[in-house]
Amino acid sequence: MKNNPLADKSYEFALKIVVLYKKIISNHKEYVLSKQLLRSGTSIGANVSEANGAISNADFSAKISIAYKESLETKYWLNLLKDTEYIGSSEANSLICDADELSKIMFSILKTTRISKNN
């Protein structure tokens, strides 16, 4: 399998989200917000993985677009969990930076695939 930085980074991000989820439910017994974070945070890598198996350029672009939106949603849940003091600012900010990095990569991919599609 060839080197895929986005797949690698999104998988590593998902691992961090799972660890955080386990910490939140263990330490705070909070299940609703943390479950939303778990779903959106792990969905990024799942959609990137599906994009890598896409059967067309449109399918690839659609899956990357979903992953991009999931990264935005994940940042929302991280901010909410931070502002409600379920997680610390430094932990939240670190994960938000990771999500931003993923978002930027995916946005760049979307720009490139949509530009090449229109040519």
Image (cartoon, helix red, strand yellow):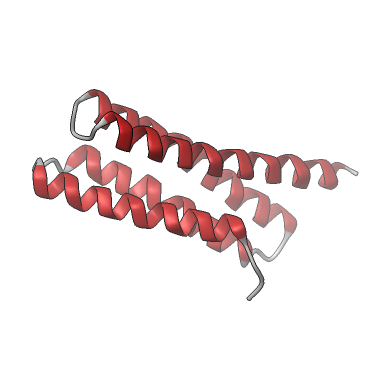
On the rendered image, what quadrant is the C terminus found in?
Answer: top right
Would residue 85 be seen by someone viewing this image from the given angle? yes
Tell me the residue at 36%/57% (across/down).
15
Q: Is residue 38 left or right of residue 32?
A: right
Q: How many marks?
A: 0
Would residue 77 be seen by someone viewing this image from the given angle? no
Q: Is residue 53 above or below residue 16?
A: below
The residue most toward the right is: 119
The residue most toward the top is: 83
Q: Is residue 65 left or right of residue 30?
A: right
Q: Is residue 70 left or right of residue 3?
A: left
Tell me the residue at 60%/49% (across/down).
64
- Residue 95 at x, y percent in the picture: 39, 40
- Residue 98 at x, y percent in the picture: 47, 42
The quarter holding residue 52 reads: bottom right
On the rendered image, what quadrant is the N terminus found in?
Answer: bottom right
Tell me the residue at 11%/50% (across/down).
26
- Residue 18 at x, y percent in the picture: 29, 54
Q: Is residue 28 above or below residue 80?
A: below
Q: Is residue 18 left or right of residue 97?
A: left
The quarter holding residue 5 reads: bottom right
Question: In terms of depth relative to the viewer, which is nearer, 13 or 117?
Answer: 13
Question: In terms of depth relative to the viewer, which is nearer, 67 or 108?
Answer: 108
Q: Is residue 109 above or below residue 56?
A: above
The quarter holding residue 112 reads: top right
The residue most toward the front is: 90
- Residue 51 at x, y percent in the picture: 60, 59
